[in-house]
Image (cartoon, helix red, strand yellow):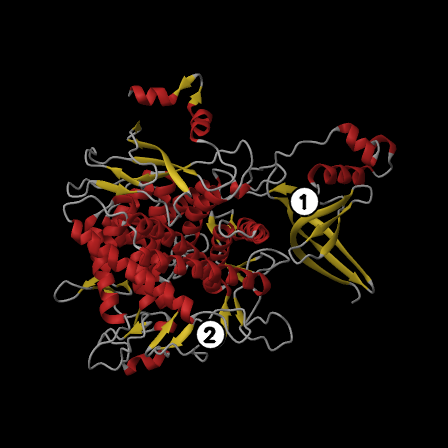
């Protein structure tokens, strides 16, 4: 091409450096080498976090003057002093193996192609370090995000009431956080927001997030729950909208794919916030609504064999939609959306991350309580649902016919549905990696059940879960490898959106629409590759997964953060430019509202600290906060952060209202709260154990407790 110039973003690791020529070679994840030239106007910076604003994180040390003169001569002896300055900057900031993102201009003219860097972003001021793997990165991000969201909705309020949420909460906010013409309050979206507030408290202990979560949980339940006539089941209204002087209740979904139905994924996500809130507070009133909603899933959506009812085949799994009038999955009214007697990824897989994992870590091991039998029945039900969902994913979702993508949509007999709506025969990259991430989590949990079975001599249970765990790990890694081939952007980082499962363009990849990237899918990729880095014995594959995790995390922190408005963009182009037209400029909304970004903040912090070797001198422990309600019938609090394997973590410190208390069992993740004072704050510190290089408990305490000559640990003992 002649006289063709285009802006191009690339991300890779420096392969070699030629300071004399003012250039360096960048190795992409594809293995390709790109020659990068600098100019007098090339700028360098270090990756910034949400809330940094104009604050520079650049702490790169200047090169030794003798080295500078050795490489590029003395400034006084060259005629082009500006280009000498540019070379010195190159020598300062660029070195082999360094990961950088470059935004530059590619110029093509006849047979000459030159790529010139305009902006170079380092991931950290220190080589072989990454900003988002530092101890405070995700804490800052979640704190800034939730504070911004509360400010946008409630201005300066620090305490909240149910009335505040009734009056001021909006599902949709504009780009700047202002209200839009759509004043709908969506139930599932509000629950996602509650998840974010609860997660923010777990990570930071910020009282404002918990105050908002309390009010949000009350309003969510009182305004949107719909109990059955006998009180045994709960379904959830889609939303509410102010209509003049009154409020109109919206029963069935308003989303085009699900209009007029009870879509199971919306009912599932009504539990996401309530369950995370229950983890923090152990509020049994909230738990009652969670249990009755799960009962509704089992009664109305579960495909179990039922005498004299041919709709229910007994083939397992959950139907994706029911008619809110007949409460059946075979109602002809569901034909309008193509959802009659169908199953899909959302109706099967979304149970796992939305509520099952968080509920199980709260009740397993069983709480010490006056209602031991009730807790055991709930735990057994959750395990049954988990096993059913996992087994169905393993048995039915696996890629076939040479495609790299899982199957996502099914008829009731599990035959594939490749004709539904917009999806047709298309793969969603984020769904594939969400499966990798969640099956790995489930395999971790199964390893705990294996350990319990070994202790009791239950060989059948041990064999069952050993097989299931291995199948989960194998499936996860297969999908992770597949997505590296077709779903990950190996030139710029991040992952793509929708692709044809069977490309017809003679290329490895065929985009269904554009080559854009959505924020929620980046979350799935980051969490999937970080957690898969922690499994398996193939060191090369583990290193590959870690590199993919870092390239995806870099793209998130580079391009999805809106520094001006302290929020997350919904969609970007493949190069990272934000797309803000139409619905994509909405700050809140059906998919974004305080869930995926907050889930990423919470779990990325946990996974990085647990699984990533961060080098000598790095603090390895992390802390979570809990605020259990005073309940005389429950004498313990479960504090497992997520599904982890035995030996991944141990508890090294517990404080109640700032006072250290003894730890009876560092590996049980259950704390005695029988003598807990009213409204107590519990802070639990965890230490990773499964890595080859990790600090000892004594090293952690020694590094932390010496402050201004005061041994804080001894002070707490005295207290």
Q: Which residue is drawn at 24% across and 73% down?
A: 324
Q: Where is residue 210 in the image (x, y as percent from the top left)?
A: 30, 43
Q: Is residue 143 left or right of residue 57?
A: left
Q: Position of residue 354 (x, y in %)?
A: 35, 57
Q: In whole angstroms, how far apart are the C-alphas of marks 1 and 2?
A: 40 Å
- Please state, as top left, top right, bottom left or bottom right, where the N terminus lies in the image: bottom right
* Mark carried by residue 97: 1
Comparing 26 with 651, the one in front is 651
Comparing 303 with 138, the one in front is 303
Q: Quadrant of residue 345?
A: bottom left
Q: Quadrant of residue 221?
A: bottom left
Q: Do the residues labelled 1 and 2 touch (CB within 8 Å)?
A: no
Q: Which residue is drawn at 22% across and 45% down?
A: 367
Which residue in the protein does label 2 denote? 423
Count of numbered tags: 2
Q: Where is residue 446 in the image (x, y as percent from the top left)?
A: 37, 54
Seen as rendered, the residue at the extreme top is 709
Comparing 670 with 264, the one in front is 670
Q: Does residue 186 appear in the picture of this structure?
A: no
Q: Element at badge 2?
A: loop
Seen as rendered, the residue at the extreme left is 230
Q: Element at badge 1?
A: loop
Q: Residues within 10 Å of mark 2 (few under 14, many from 20)?
A: some
Q: Which residue is drawn at 42% across and 59% down?
A: 439
Q: Does residue 468 appear in the picture of this structure?
A: yes
Comparing 195 with 451, the one in front is 451
Q: Residues within 10 Å of mark 1 (few under 14, many from 20)?
A: some
Q: Where is residue 587 in the image (x, y as percent from the top left)?
A: 43, 55
Q: Is tag 1's residue or tag 2's residue first in the polypeptide sequence?
A: 1
- Please state, as top left, top right, bottom left or bottom right, where the C terminus lies in the image: top left
In the rendered image, the vertical position of residue 287 relative to residue 256, given as above or below: above
Q: Is residue 58 left or right of residue 458?
A: right
């Amino acid at each position: 091409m002649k006289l063709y110039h285009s802006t191009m973003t690339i991300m890779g690791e420096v392969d070699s450096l030629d300071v004399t020529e003012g250039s360096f070679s960048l190795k992409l994840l594809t293995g390709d080498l790109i020659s990068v030239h600098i100019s007098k106007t090339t700028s360098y910076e270090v990756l910034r976090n949400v809330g940094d604003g104009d604050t520079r994180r650049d702490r790169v040390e200047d090169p030794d003057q003798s080295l500078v003169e050795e490489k590029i001569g003395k400034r006084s002896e060259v005629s082009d002093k500006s280009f000498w300055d540019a070379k010195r900057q190159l020598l300062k900031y660029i070195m082999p193996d360094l990961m950088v993102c470059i935004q530059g201009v590619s110029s093509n003219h006849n047979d000459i192609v030159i790529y010139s860097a305009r902006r170079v972003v380092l991931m950290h001021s220190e080589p072989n370090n990454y900003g988002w793997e530092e101890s405070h990165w995700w804490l800052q991000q979640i704190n800034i995000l939730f504070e911004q969201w509360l400010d946008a909705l409630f201005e300066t309020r620090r305490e909240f009431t149910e009335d505040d949420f009734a009056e001021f909460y909006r599902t949709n906010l504009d780009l700047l956080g202002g209200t839009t013409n759509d004043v709908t309050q969506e139930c599932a979206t509000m629950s996602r927001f509650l998840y974010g507030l609860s997660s923010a408290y777990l990570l930071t202990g910020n009282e404002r997030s918990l105050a908002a979560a309390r009010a949000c949980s009350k309003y969510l339940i009182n305004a949107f729950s719909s109990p059955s006539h006998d009180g045994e089941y709960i379904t959830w209204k889609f939303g509410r909208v102010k209509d003049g002087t009154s409020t109109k209740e919206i029963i069935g979904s308003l989303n085009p794919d699900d209009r007029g139905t009870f879509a199971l994924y919306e009912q599932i996500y009504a539990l996401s916030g309530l369950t995370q809130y229950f983890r923090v507070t152990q509020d049994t009133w909230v738990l009652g609504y969670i249990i009755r909603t799960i009962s509704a899933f089992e009664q109305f959506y579960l495909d179990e064999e039922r005498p004299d009812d041919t709709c229910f085949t007994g083939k397992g799994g959950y139907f994706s939609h029911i008619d809110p009038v007949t409460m059946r999955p075979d109602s002809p009214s569901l034909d309008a959306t193509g959802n009659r007697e169908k199953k899909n990824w959302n109706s099967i897989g979304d149970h796992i991350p939305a509520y099952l994992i968080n509920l199980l870590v709260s009740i397993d091991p069983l709480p010490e309580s006056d209602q031991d039998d009730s807790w055991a029945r709930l735990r057994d039900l959750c395990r049954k649902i988990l096993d059913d969902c996992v087994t169905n994913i393993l048995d039915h979702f696996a890629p076939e016919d040479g495609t790299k993508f899982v199957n996502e949509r099914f008829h009731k007999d599990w035959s594939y549905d490749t004709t539904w709506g917009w999806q047709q025969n298309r793969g969603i990259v984020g769904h594939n990696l969400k499966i990798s991430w969640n099956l790995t989590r489930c395999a971790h949990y199964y390893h705990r059940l294996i350990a319990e079975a070994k202790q009791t001599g239950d060989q059948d249970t041990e064999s069952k879960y050993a097989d299931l765990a291995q199948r989960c790990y194998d499936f996860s890694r297969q999908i992770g490898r597949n997505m590296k081939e077709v779903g990950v952007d190996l030139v710029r980082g991040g992952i793509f959106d929708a692709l044809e499962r069977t490309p017809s363009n003679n290329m490895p990849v065929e985009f269904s629409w554009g080559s854009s990237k959505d924020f929620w899918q980046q979350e799935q990729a980051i969490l999937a590759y970080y957690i898969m880095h922690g499994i398996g014995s193939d060191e090369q594959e583990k290193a590959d997964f870690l590199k993919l995790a870092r390239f995806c995390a870099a793209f998130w922190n580079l391009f999805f953060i809106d520094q001006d408005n302290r929020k997350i963009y919904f969609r970007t182009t493949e190069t990272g430019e934000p797309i803000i037209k139409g619905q994509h400029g909405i700050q809140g909304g059906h998919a974004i509202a305080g869930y995926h970004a907050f889930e990423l903040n919470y779990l990325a912090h946990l996974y990085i600290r647990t699984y990533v070797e961060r080098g000598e001198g790095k603090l390895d422990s992390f802390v979570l906060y809990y605020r259990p309600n005073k309940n005389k019938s429950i004498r313990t609090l479960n504090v497992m952060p997520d599904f982890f394997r035995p030996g991944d973590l141990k508890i090294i410190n517990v404080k109640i209202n700032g006072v250290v208390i003894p730890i009876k069992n560092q590996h049980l993740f259950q704390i005695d709260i029988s003598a807990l004072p009213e409204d107590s704050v519990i802070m639990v510190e965890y230490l990773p154990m499964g890595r080859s290089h990790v600090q000892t408990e004594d090293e952690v305490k020694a590094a932390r407790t010496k402050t201004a000559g005061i041994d804080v640990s001894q002070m707490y003992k005295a207290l």
